[in-house]
Amino acid sequence: MKIAYFDCFAGASGDMILGSLMDAGLEIERLKAELAKLHLTHYDLQMKKVVKKGIGGCQALVVVDEDHHHQHHRHLADIKNIIAQSDLEDSIRQRSIAIFARLAEAEAKVHRTGIEQIHFHEVGAMDAIIDVVGAVAGIAALGIQKIFCSPLHLGSGTVECAHGTLPVPAPTTAELVKGKPVYSTGVLGELLTPTGAAILTTLASDFGPMPAMSVEKIGYGAGTSDPAIPNLLRVMIGQTAGDVKEVEMAHEDCKRSSGKGGSS
């Protein structure tokens, strides 16, 4: 079985996930062809080769026509409708909708309101739709059948967003990672974004040390900021060392022995 392990040593964001998949071999034209099935316009997906503190990677850039989208807020129902009416495969539609539903639930809990009242700020923008659907479609295009993820590096300090200056992790991110292993080393800045957290906590089967696998491809997805550590998300793609049940059991044993697999 082909699996992927996301190593979030510098956190994760939607564009970092996309970049890591492209650096690991996902062709941008293949991804663009999948995203075209959304029937959205006034944006362009670009890829840029960058180096972060000596490590090369790919940076995914969603260039949006701001004159067309600058005041376009969407509710969950709007996003569901866009995805449901697309020509994407059913499994890609379902997983993409599940990610946005998880985001809406987290936002609603933070704002103490109903899901239907949530206006997606960062999330409802065109780039977030491309990040989420692109990540799901890209994982499918690479033939990845199961996802594992490291503990999530959050960052520290504060972050500027639509609601002003907020603590890191942002409240929505904190809500999304409940029950998952997280940590902070004191690196300043927001390392894990709400979109990145929603994608990984929805799609990953388990969080902890890297499972037993034969690595075939490695990709690095670059973020836009430059904290004290390389702002990169690493993905390792390969085959399981045994059947998936054996890998999951070995992963649980490794988590117990390392003491890093619990919730925090």
Image (cartoon, helix red, strand yellow):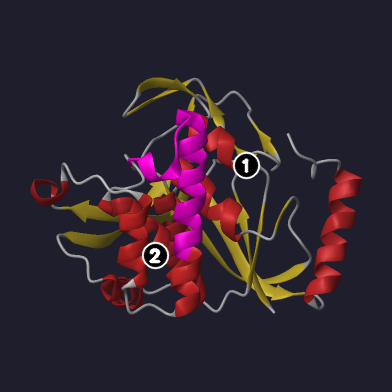
Q: Residues within 10 Å of mark 1 (few under 14, many from 20)?
A: many
Marks 2 and 1, Cα distance to the nearest angstrom? Answer: 21 Å
- Name the residue rendered at 19%, 52% in the picture: 64
- Name the residue rendered at 79%, 45% in the picture: 261
The residues colored magenta run 96-119
Residue 58, x across and y down, in percent = 39, 57
The local secondary structure at tag 1 comes to: strand
Residue type, numbered disc 1: Leu
Asked if residue 118 is among those painted magenta in the image, a careful observer would answer yes
Q: Quadrant of the N terminus?
A: bottom right
2 or 1: tag closer to the N-terminus:
2
The local secondary structure at tag 2 comes to: helix
Labelled disc at residue 180: none
- Name the residue rendered at 51%, 40% in the picture: 106
Residue type, numbered disc 2: Gly
Q: Does 58 sit left or right of 245 as displayed?
A: left
Q: Quadrant of residue 159?
A: top left
- Name the residue rendered at 26%, 74% in the picture: 36
Q: Which residue carries the number 1 mark?
A: 152
Q: Quadrant of residue 89?
A: bottom left
Q: Quadrant of the C terminus?
A: top right
Labelled disc at residue 134: 2
Q: Relative to residue 199, is residue 40 depicted above or below?
A: below
Query: Quick check: can you spot residue 2?
Result: yes
Residue 85, x across and y down, in percent = 31, 73
